[in-house]
Amino acid sequence: MGKTVRDVLVRTLENLGKKSFKRFKNKLNDWEFKEGYSQIPYGKLEEADEEDVAKFIINYYKEPYGIEVTLGVLEAIDERQAAENLRTALKTVSGCVSHEPAKREDQGAAAGDEKHFVDKHRTDLIQRVTLVAPILDDLLQDGLLPCEAYDTVRSINTNQEKMRALYDHVKSWGNKDKDKFLQSLIRHNPPLIRDLEEAKA
Protein backbone atom coordinates (compact mmCIF):
# COMPACT_ATOMS: atom_id res chain seq x y z
CA MET A 1 0.00 0.00 0.00
CA GLY A 2 1.41 3.41 -1.00
CA LYS A 3 1.83 6.45 1.18
CA THR A 4 -1.22 8.56 1.99
CA VAL A 5 -1.49 12.32 2.51
CA ARG A 6 -1.83 11.65 6.22
CA ASP A 7 1.41 9.62 6.23
CA VAL A 8 3.22 12.50 4.58
CA LEU A 9 1.77 15.04 7.03
CA VAL A 10 2.82 12.89 9.99
CA ARG A 11 6.38 12.61 8.67
CA THR A 12 6.53 16.37 8.06
CA LEU A 13 5.39 17.15 11.61
CA GLU A 14 7.75 14.57 13.12
CA ASN A 15 10.67 16.24 11.36
CA LEU A 16 9.91 19.63 12.90
CA GLY A 17 11.30 18.93 16.34
CA LYS A 18 9.53 19.64 19.64
CA LYS A 19 9.86 23.44 19.69
CA SER A 20 8.77 23.96 16.09
CA PHE A 21 5.96 21.41 16.46
CA LYS A 22 4.62 23.41 19.41
CA ARG A 23 4.82 26.62 17.34
CA PHE A 24 3.01 24.82 14.54
CA LYS A 25 0.13 23.88 16.86
CA ASN A 26 -0.08 27.41 18.27
CA LYS A 27 -0.14 28.98 14.81
CA LEU A 28 -2.68 26.41 13.59
CA ASN A 29 -4.92 27.45 16.47
CA ASP A 30 -4.61 31.12 15.42
CA TRP A 31 -5.07 30.49 11.68
CA GLU A 32 -7.77 32.34 9.74
CA PHE A 33 -9.74 29.67 7.92
CA LYS A 34 -11.93 29.90 4.87
CA GLU A 35 -15.64 30.33 5.39
CA GLY A 36 -17.24 27.01 6.23
CA TYR A 37 -14.25 25.67 8.17
CA SER A 38 -13.76 25.82 11.93
CA GLN A 39 -10.74 25.78 14.20
CA ILE A 40 -9.57 22.58 15.81
CA PRO A 41 -10.28 23.14 19.54
CA TYR A 42 -7.03 24.02 21.30
CA GLY A 43 -7.87 21.54 24.04
CA LYS A 44 -7.47 18.81 21.40
CA LEU A 45 -4.31 20.30 19.91
CA GLU A 46 -2.49 21.04 23.15
CA GLU A 47 -1.70 17.45 24.09
CA ALA A 48 -1.88 16.00 20.55
CA ASP A 49 1.13 14.27 19.04
CA GLU A 50 2.13 14.43 15.39
CA GLU A 51 -0.21 11.61 14.33
CA ASP A 52 -3.14 13.19 16.14
CA VAL A 53 -2.54 16.61 14.58
CA ALA A 54 -2.31 15.11 11.09
CA LYS A 55 -5.55 13.22 11.74
CA PHE A 56 -7.28 16.40 12.94
CA ILE A 57 -6.12 18.36 9.87
CA ILE A 58 -7.51 15.72 7.50
CA ASN A 59 -10.74 15.27 9.46
CA TYR A 60 -11.47 18.98 9.88
CA TYR A 61 -10.30 20.29 6.51
CA LYS A 62 -10.13 17.29 4.14
CA GLU A 63 -7.06 16.72 2.00
CA PRO A 64 -6.92 19.64 -0.48
CA TYR A 65 -7.58 22.41 2.04
CA GLY A 66 -5.71 20.55 4.80
CA ILE A 67 -2.59 20.56 2.63
CA GLU A 68 -3.05 24.27 1.90
CA VAL A 69 -3.43 25.07 5.62
CA THR A 70 -0.39 22.98 6.58
CA LEU A 71 1.80 24.66 3.96
CA GLY A 72 0.59 28.10 5.06
CA VAL A 73 1.25 27.42 8.75
CA LEU A 74 4.73 26.02 8.04
CA GLU A 75 5.66 29.12 6.07
CA ALA A 76 4.17 31.39 8.75
CA ILE A 77 6.49 29.86 11.40
CA ASP A 78 9.49 30.14 9.04
CA GLU A 79 9.70 26.41 8.38
CA ARG A 80 10.02 27.00 4.63
CA GLN A 81 12.26 24.01 4.06
CA ALA A 82 9.70 21.77 5.77
CA ALA A 83 7.01 23.24 3.49
CA GLU A 84 9.16 22.58 0.44
CA ASN A 85 9.85 19.02 1.62
CA LEU A 86 6.12 18.50 2.09
CA ARG A 87 5.40 19.67 -1.46
CA THR A 88 8.03 17.27 -2.76
CA ALA A 89 6.71 14.37 -0.66
CA LEU A 90 3.13 14.99 -1.81
CA LYS A 91 4.19 14.28 -5.39
CA THR A 92 4.83 10.68 -4.35
CA VAL A 93 1.31 10.22 -2.99
CA SER A 94 -0.92 8.45 -5.47
CA GLY A 95 -3.93 10.59 -6.36
CA CYS A 96 -2.85 13.42 -4.08
CA VAL A 97 -3.91 16.16 -6.45
CA SER A 98 -6.96 14.55 -7.99
CA HIS A 99 -8.59 13.16 -4.84
CA GLU A 100 -11.51 15.54 -5.48
CA PRO A 101 -13.72 14.39 -8.33
CA ALA A 102 -13.08 16.38 -11.47
CA LYS A 103 -16.01 18.74 -11.67
CA ARG A 104 -17.60 20.31 -14.67
CA GLU A 105 -14.94 19.19 -17.10
CA ASP A 106 -16.99 20.72 -19.90
CA GLN A 107 -15.88 24.12 -18.64
CA GLY A 108 -12.53 23.79 -20.37
CA ALA A 109 -12.02 24.07 -24.08
CA ALA A 110 -15.20 23.46 -26.01
CA ALA A 111 -15.35 21.80 -29.39
CA GLY A 112 -13.58 23.46 -32.26
CA ASP A 113 -11.34 26.46 -31.78
CA GLU A 114 -13.31 28.16 -29.02
CA LYS A 115 -11.10 29.75 -26.39
CA HIS A 116 -10.49 27.94 -23.12
CA PHE A 117 -12.45 29.27 -20.12
CA VAL A 118 -9.29 30.65 -18.48
CA ASP A 119 -8.34 32.51 -21.67
CA LYS A 120 -11.83 33.82 -22.32
CA HIS A 121 -12.11 35.23 -18.79
CA ARG A 122 -8.48 36.31 -18.43
CA THR A 123 -9.27 39.95 -17.56
CA ASP A 124 -11.92 39.07 -14.96
CA LEU A 125 -9.73 36.42 -13.38
CA ILE A 126 -6.77 38.79 -13.11
CA GLN A 127 -8.93 41.49 -11.55
CA ARG A 128 -11.10 39.38 -9.25
CA VAL A 129 -9.26 36.27 -7.98
CA THR A 130 -8.65 36.81 -4.27
CA LEU A 131 -7.02 33.53 -3.20
CA VAL A 132 -3.89 33.28 -5.33
CA ALA A 133 -1.47 31.50 -2.95
CA PRO A 134 -3.30 28.13 -2.83
CA ILE A 135 -3.59 28.18 -6.63
CA LEU A 136 0.17 28.64 -6.88
CA ASP A 137 0.62 25.73 -4.46
CA ASP A 138 -1.57 23.54 -6.67
CA LEU A 139 0.30 24.50 -9.84
CA LEU A 140 3.67 23.87 -8.21
CA GLN A 141 2.47 20.50 -6.96
CA ASP A 142 1.19 19.64 -10.46
CA GLY A 143 4.56 20.51 -11.94
CA LEU A 144 3.04 23.32 -14.03
CA LEU A 145 4.97 26.07 -12.27
CA PRO A 146 8.74 25.73 -11.71
CA CYS A 147 9.99 26.56 -8.20
CA GLU A 148 11.71 29.74 -9.40
CA ALA A 149 8.53 31.01 -11.09
CA TYR A 150 6.49 30.03 -8.02
CA ASP A 151 8.78 32.06 -5.74
CA THR A 152 8.75 35.03 -8.13
CA VAL A 153 4.96 35.18 -8.40
CA ARG A 154 4.47 34.69 -4.65
CA SER A 155 6.81 37.58 -3.89
CA ILE A 156 4.60 40.06 -5.80
CA ASN A 157 2.52 42.29 -3.53
CA THR A 158 -0.97 42.47 -5.03
CA ASN A 159 -3.24 39.64 -6.16
CA GLN A 160 -3.84 41.36 -9.50
CA GLU A 161 -0.13 41.57 -10.27
CA LYS A 162 0.37 37.97 -9.12
CA MET A 163 -2.35 36.80 -11.49
CA ARG A 164 -0.96 38.90 -14.34
CA ALA A 165 2.49 37.35 -13.81
CA LEU A 166 0.94 33.88 -13.58
CA TYR A 167 -0.77 34.39 -16.93
CA ASP A 168 2.67 34.86 -18.51
CA HIS A 169 3.07 31.12 -17.88
CA VAL A 170 -0.54 30.10 -18.55
CA LYS A 171 -0.45 31.40 -22.12
CA SER A 172 2.10 28.72 -23.08
CA TRP A 173 0.08 25.83 -21.61
CA GLY A 174 -2.06 23.35 -23.51
CA ASN A 175 -5.72 22.73 -22.73
CA LYS A 176 -5.03 19.85 -20.30
CA ASP A 177 -2.78 22.08 -18.19
CA LYS A 178 -5.31 24.90 -18.39
CA ASP A 179 -7.96 22.42 -17.20
CA LYS A 180 -5.85 21.82 -14.07
CA PHE A 181 -5.55 25.56 -13.56
CA LEU A 182 -9.32 25.86 -13.89
CA GLN A 183 -9.93 23.07 -11.37
CA SER A 184 -7.74 24.94 -8.88
CA LEU A 185 -9.70 28.15 -9.54
CA ILE A 186 -12.95 26.27 -8.94
CA ARG A 187 -11.60 24.79 -5.70
CA HIS A 188 -10.32 28.03 -4.20
CA ASN A 189 -12.54 30.74 -5.75
CA PRO A 190 -15.88 29.00 -6.42
CA PRO A 191 -18.20 32.06 -6.16
CA LEU A 192 -16.20 33.93 -8.80
CA ILE A 193 -16.19 30.99 -11.23
CA ARG A 194 -19.95 30.51 -10.76
CA ASP A 195 -20.46 34.21 -11.46
CA LEU A 196 -18.43 34.02 -14.68
CA GLU A 197 -20.30 30.89 -15.78
CA GLU A 198 -23.65 32.57 -15.20
CA ALA A 199 -22.52 35.65 -17.12
CA LYS A 200 -21.53 33.39 -20.01
CA ALA A 201 -24.86 31.56 -20.01
Image: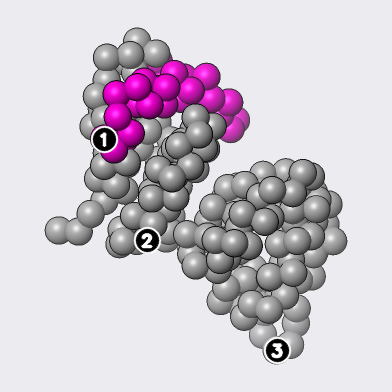
Q: Residue 48 location in percent, x, y?
A: 27, 20
Element type at mark 3: loop
Q: Mark 2 vs mark 3: which is more N-terminal?
A: 2
Q: Amino acid at mark 3?
A: Gly
- Whether residue 27 sits left or right of residue 46 in the image: it is right
Q: Which residues are magenta?
A: 13-41
Q: Amino acid at mark 2?
A: Lys
Was residue 67 drawn as part of the magenta stretch in this picture?
no
Q: Residue 121 location in percent, x, y?
A: 79, 64
Q: Do the CB atoms of the residues marked 1 and 2 lie less than 8 Å apart?
A: no
Element type at mark 2: loop
Residue labelled with disc 2: 91
**Residue 182: quadrant of the picture:** bottom right
Q: Do the CB atoms of the residues marked 2 and 3 lie less than 8 Å apart?
A: no
Residue labelled with disc 1: 14
95, above or below 39, in the image: below
79, above or below 167, in the image: above
- Whether residue 82 sits left or right of residue 54 in the image: it is right
Residue labelled with disc 3: 112
- Whether residue 146 sits left or right of residue 57 in the image: it is right
Q: Residue 28 location in percent, x, y?
A: 46, 25
Residue at 68% across, 78% down: 172
- Whether residue 91 sits left or right of residue 173 in the image: it is left
Q: Do the CB atoms of the residues marked 3 and 1 lie less than 8 Å apart?
A: no
**Residue 168: quadrant of the picture:** bottom right
Q: Which residue is more in the foreground, 22 or 104?
A: 22
Q: CA distance from mark 3 to mark 1?
A: 51 Å
User: Which quadrant of the figure contains the N terminus?
Assistant: bottom left
